[in-house]
Amino acid sequence: MPIIVNLDVMMAKRKMSLNELSERVGLTLANLSILKTGKAKAVRFTTLEAICEALECQPGDILEYQAE
């Protein structure tokens, strides 16, 4: 899949655990884990906004396009 999710990278840079991000964003651990592993088929802008706010980053820091 040409869209790469770098959520784990941003979490590591911010020294934030999946549990902490889950609490701040209001998503279940299961849903965040699906996003983190790149298995998500879609992401809502409201979810992306909440993650960016919690991690103090831009959407481009989390999502990356790589041509196959």
Image: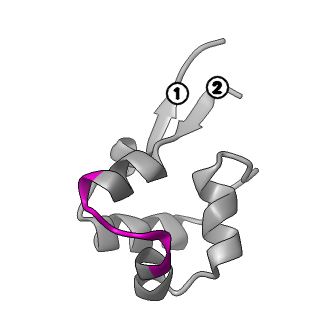
Q: State which region is magenta.
A: 13-19
Where is residue 40 drawn, in percent x and y?
A: 72, 53
Whether residue 61 is situated above or below residue 15 in the rendered picture: above
- Disc 1 or 2, which lies upstream in sequence? 2
Quick one: which residue is furthest to the top in this view?
A: 68
Q: Is residue 37 visible from the viewing direction of this image?
A: yes
Amino acid at pointer 1: Tyr
- Left or right: 44 in relation to 46: right
Residue for point 45% across, 51% down: 8
- The answer to whether residue 58 shows anywhere in this view is no
Image quarter of the N terminus: top right
Residue on which the image places disc 1: 65
Q: Secondary structure at mark 2?
A: loop
Name the residue at 47% across, 33% down: 64
Q: Residue at x 56, y 35 (%)?
A: 4
Do labels 1 and 2 touch, CB within 8 Å? yes
